[in-house]
Image (tube, rainbow, N blue to C red):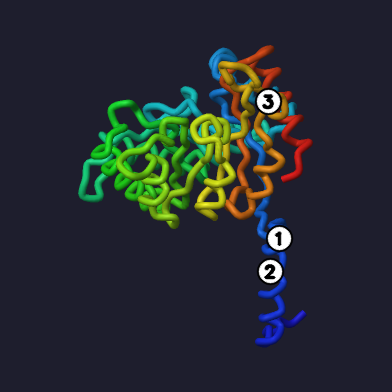
């Protein structure tokens, strides 16, 4: 079939159709491919005891993707990037994202990263990651000066990741929703990072706990959230994490805004357990699959 140029009238009709869908609240046509993954921190003790057996069990649960949290000194869970990539491939798994720590000390200023950060990015590219995500901000970096320095470093890391075919990202907790100056730390991070270089992994449990307005963040910064962490909040005084569907967070309502937010990676995570970690993440997967998103 020959390609046909779209004339001005047809283009206008397509544009109006898209606008109409947006006005009607139907964002489905914007939705990218959906990925469901598991943050391996959730089952860290099982992974440490039996790496291959645990990953095999994760695959049998239905997961096809995992998010790493066991990188150090050039290795993933004690394996070289090539070794770990093969283990995943042999089990029918992939690791599109990983939590790889960065502190203000990893940015030397003047566009230069530490050797440790350079090695991290190289290793992540070799293992096949698409996203390199800073999972946490250490206590000593949580002041106006350090945050500004770290944000600059995120952009530099983003440049390095882009050259390696990846995207840099930041994963939040609840402390980012406290103000530094006239803005919350989270606003400083999102607005200070280049959207072409840095994405956000919004942890919906922590955004609800810290601000209670997850949907508002998704609406305020459209296209900035390529990944989200999905874990529910218990209806208790402690508000501990529970499996998706067993808590107070209305994920079905939040997920309506996922296309607008640019979200395609939905990563299950658990930090507290009513049963065992493995049973918990299996249940979370089943409950998440029941939701429309």
Q: Is residue 2 above or below residue 226?
A: below
| Residue 103, image quadrant | top left
Lower position in the chain sequence, tag 3 or tag 1: 1
Asked if residue 93 is positioned above or below residue 215 in the image, the reply reads above
- Give the number of the disc on residue 247: 3
Task: Looking at the picture, tell me which residue is in the foreground, 19 or 133.
Answer: 19
* Quarter residue 12 falls in: bottom right
Q: Nearer the viewer, mark 3 or mark 2?
A: 3
Q: Secondary structure at mark 2?
A: helix
Q: Earlier in the sequence, mark 3 or mark 2?
A: 2
- The x and y percentages for residue 5 are 67, 85
Q: Marks 3 and 1, Cα distance to the nearest angstrom?
A: 29 Å
* Residue at position x 49%, y 28% in the image: 69
Q: Where does residue 260 sit, x and y in percent of width and height?
A: 61, 55
Q: Is 138 left, or right, of 29 in this rendering?
A: left
Q: Which residue is mark 1?
A: 29
Q: Which mark is residue 18?
A: 2
Q: Sequence order check: which comes first, mark 1 or mark 2?
A: 2
Q: CA distance from mark 3 to mark 2?
A: 35 Å
Question: Helix or strand or loop: what does disc 3 sit on?
Answer: loop
């Amino acid at each position: 079939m020959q390609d046909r140029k779209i004339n001005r009238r047809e283009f206008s009709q397509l544009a109006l159709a898209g606008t109409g869908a947006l006005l009607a609240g139907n964002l489905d046509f914007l939705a990218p491919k959906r990925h469901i993954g598991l943050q391996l921190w959730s089952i860290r003790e099982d992974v440490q005891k039996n790496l291959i057996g645990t990953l095999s069990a994760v695959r049998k649960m239905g997961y096809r993707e995992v998010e790493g949290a066991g990188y150090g000194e050039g290795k993933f869970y004690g394996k070289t990037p090539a070794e770990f990539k093969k283990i995943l491939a042999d089990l029918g798994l992939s690791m599109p994202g990983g939590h790889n720590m960065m502190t203000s000390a990893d940015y030397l200023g003047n566009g230069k990263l530490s050797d440790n950060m350079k090695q991290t990015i190289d290793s992540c590219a070799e293992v096949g990651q698409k996203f390199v995500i800073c999972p946490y901000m250490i206590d000593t970096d949580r002041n106006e000066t350090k945050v500004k320095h770290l944000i600059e470093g995120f952009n530099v890391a983003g440049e390095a990741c882009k050259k390696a075919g990846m995207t840099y990202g930041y994963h939040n907790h609840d402390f980012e929703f406290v103000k530094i100056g006239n803005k919350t730390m989270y606003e400083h991070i999102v607005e200070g990072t280049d959207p072409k270089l840095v994405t956000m992994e919004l942890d919906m449990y922590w955004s609800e706990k810290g601000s209670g307005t997850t949907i508002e963040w998704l609406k305020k910064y459209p296209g900035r959230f390529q990944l989200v962490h999905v874990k529910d909040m218990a209806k208790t005084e402690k508000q501990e994490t529970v499996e998706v569907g067993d808590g107070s967070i209305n994920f079905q309502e939040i997920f309506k805004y996922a296309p607008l937010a640019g979200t395609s990676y939905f990563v299950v995570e658990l930090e507290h357990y009513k049963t065992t970690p493995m049973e918990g993440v299996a249940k979370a997967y089943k409950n998440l699959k029941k939701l429309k998103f």
